[in-house]
């Protein structure tokens, strides 16, 4: 059974810091890994999608890496801003589960001004 | 604009009163899915559909029904809602099985009293 774990569960940093969110998954037979952002009580916004054959993806201040063999992904946020405060969710699409997204529990990020 | 549209955004209902949450996507996606999100339990898949007239159970299908008569629509039906179905519901879509990313709707917050 595919399980996804995110560390840390919560993170509070001062504005301007660079930070790393971690995601690990137990089964490397994945199609892709997707990072989402969720504001309180709101929907999920896709941040980055990394295919299983890729090592990283970048969008603005965000960079996500994928090491499929070790079952790990990191989301790097450069020069954090208060507007980055949200919950960040990692999810994988496992090859044997149809097209189901398996989510981690998320990292709650607070960036203090 | 490419999007997944859910309605209603908020719904308060009484136990046993049948309700339908609608979901529509304008991206010609084959794959559609419903998730519920609960504190401490994260996001769990309810039902999914790989294509028109093809639906299957996810991890928590009890108490729910779905249908896929058209490619763009995937309604979630609660025939006899109960308080344990109080949750935040999300519809999501994707091009199909494999390395495609997901687009999520804005969510429906359902309260059953």
Image (cartoon, coloured by chain):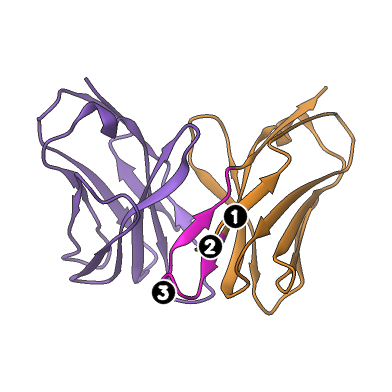
Chain colours: A orange, B purple
In the image, residue B54 above or below residue A102: below
User: Is the same chain shared between marks 2 and 3?
Assistant: no
- Residue B37 in the image: x percent, y percent? 43, 39
Q: Does residue B77 appear to the left or right of A87 in the view shown?
A: left
- Give the foreground label among 3 and 1: 1
In the image, residue A95 above or below residue A113: below
According to the image, label 3 marks what residue?
B96
Chain of the residue under label 3: B
> In the image, which disc is placed on residue A4?
1
Secondary structure found at label 2:
loop
Numbered range of the magenta stretch: A92-105
Q: Residues within 10 Å of mark 3 (few under 14, many from 20)?
A: some
Chain of the residue under label 2: A
Secondary structure found at label 3:
loop
Q: Residues within 10 Å of mark 1 (few under 14, many from 20)?
A: many
Q: Does residue A93 appear to the left or right of A111 in the view shown?
A: left
According to the image, label 2 marks what residue?
A2
């Amino acid at each position: 059974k595919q399980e996804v774990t995110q560390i840390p569960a919560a993170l509070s940093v001062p504005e301007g810091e660079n930070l790393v969110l971690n995601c690990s998954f137990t089964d490397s037979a994945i199609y892709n890994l997707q990072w989402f952002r969720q504001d309180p009580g709101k929907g999920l916004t896709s941040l980055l999608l990394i295919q299983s054959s890729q090592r990283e993806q970048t969008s603005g201040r965000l960079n996500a890496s994928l090491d499929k063999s070790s079952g790990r992904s990191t989301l790097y946020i450069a020069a954090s801003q208060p507007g980055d405060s949200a919950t960040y969710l990692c999810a994988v699409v496992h090859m044997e589960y149809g097209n189901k997204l398996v989510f981690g529990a998320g990292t709650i990020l607070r960036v203090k001004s | 604009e490419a999007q997944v549209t859910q309605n209603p955004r908020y719904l308060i209902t009484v136990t046993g009163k049948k309700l339908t949450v609608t979901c529509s996507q304008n991206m010609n996606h084959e794959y559609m899915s419903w998730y519920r999100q609960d504190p401490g339990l994260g996001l769990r898949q309810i039902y999914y559909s790989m294509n028109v007239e093809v639906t299957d159970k996810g991890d928590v299908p009890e108490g729910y029904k779905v249908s896929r008569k058209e490619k763009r629509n995937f309604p979630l039906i609660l025939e006899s809602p109960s308080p344990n179905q109080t949750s935040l519901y999300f519809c999501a879509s994707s091009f199909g099985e494999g390395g495609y990313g997901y687009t999520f709707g804005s969510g429906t917050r359902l309260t059953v009293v």
